[in-house]
Image (cartoon, rainbow, N blue to C red):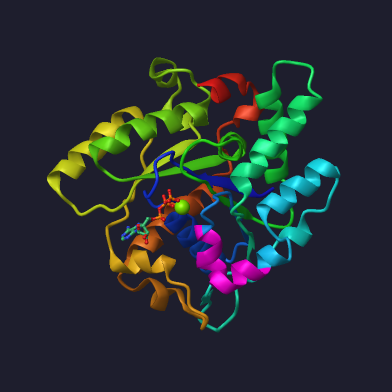
Amino acid sequence: MALYLAVANRKGGVGKSTVSVMLAHSLSIWGGKRVLVVDIDSQCNASIILLGGRGWREARDKRKTISDYFVDCFKTPHTAAEPYLVREAGDVVGASGRRPVLDILPGSLLIDEVQGDLFLDLASGHQGKNLIIDLSRRLGQLLRRWDGAYDVVIMDCAPGLSFVTHAAIATADRVIVPFRPDYVSLMAIDRISLVAEGASNLDELAQIPFSRRRYMCLPNFVRGRGAERLLIEEVGLTHPMAEMQLAHRDGIANAFEWSADTRTIDAKYGDGVADLRRLYDEVSSMLVNGNAPPRIYAHDTHTALSA
Ligand SMILES: Nc1ncnc2c1ncn2[C@@H]1O[C@H](COP(=O)(O)OP(=O)(O)OP(=O)(O)O)[C@@H](O)[C@H]1O
Ligand SMILES: [Mg+2]
């Protein structure tokens, strides 16, 4: 059974793609895990970071993207998933020069339009009122087809809450919510937490103990100022918080720098390696514990999707 992680926040620019890529590199290199990244965002940042611009365009020309995967699977049930993946992604190798098992289902510029088309197709033959739930459920099933082939599947979500992002959050074992410790970010966290837990409001959310929640907030861009500390503490009263925080560092920004020449993880992340190690340790413990709280699809999706 793979561990499915969604990295999500409806707010843009908080570090979702950066954290996705950092986890992919560290879990595959340091942890020796077989890792798949699923790029759900039409900006395709994770794909461009892990394949380079040229590699991503080649994948797109060969119809190896999440849009092609969804369209073909909706048209022809039981379509095999593997042909849509690109193997050996990333520009980082182990100390011995060994490439990790790090594959990607590349993103597509058209994923937003494709979701709309799938919705309309489904609507045309649909009887009941649960159309949105049915679509999200089907997308969720297609996002969870990698057991056996991978140990960890990392879904880099788009900002906002599209059907596919809903499906990724609802279907994931764990949801990591990077956020910037400033006041405008607070509302976005509240909203994503409701979706992750299928709660309709914060009072309902408060009934769920932290230990039963699937999501975890991760402060990013931390500069160590007092105001930030207070804000992180305030968020931590309402939401489960990671033990570690990611500092604002050039080395972490390097996650975005694709290089055609492979390098070690230390060379790539420079002054961000210690942050990466702490992130890796914390997320690795989710793999060991294996007792993730139940997913939304285990009970009711309705509240999650209409929240
Ligand atoms: N801890 C950090 N220190 C320095 N730069 C960072 C850090 N985290 C992210 N960045 C930089 O901030 C920018 C936004 O990060 P990123 O693209 O990962 O956010 P995102 O949430 O995925 O954005 P979007 O919502 O557009 O998908 C990038 O240029 C990235 O390199
Ligand atoms: Mg992103």
Q: Residue at x 26, y 39 (%)?
A: 232
Q: Is residue 221 above or below residue 239?
A: below
The residue most toward the left is 226
Left or right, residue 249 beside residue 81: left
The residue closer to the viewer here, 145 or 66, is: 66
Q: Residue at x 77, y 59 (%)?
A: 82
Left or right, residue 15 beside residue 25: left
125 magenta-colored: no
Residue 168 at what x, y percent from top left?
59, 40
Q: Is residue 80 above or below residue 30?
A: above
Q: Is residue 212 above or below residue 226?
A: above
Left or right, residue 103 beside residue 97: right
Residue 217 appearing in the image: yes
Residue 120 at what x, y percent from top left?
71, 31
Q: Main secondary structure of the magenta part?
A: helix
| Number of marks drawn | 0
Residue 31 appearing in the image: no
* Res 132 → quadrant: top right
Residue 99 at what x, y percent from top left?
60, 76
* Res 249 → quadrant: bottom left
Which contiguous range is marked in magenta?
Answer: 45-58
* Res 179 → quadrant: top left
Residue 32 at what x, y percent from top left?
58, 66
51 magenta-colored: yes
The residue closer to the viewer here, 224 or 13, is: 13
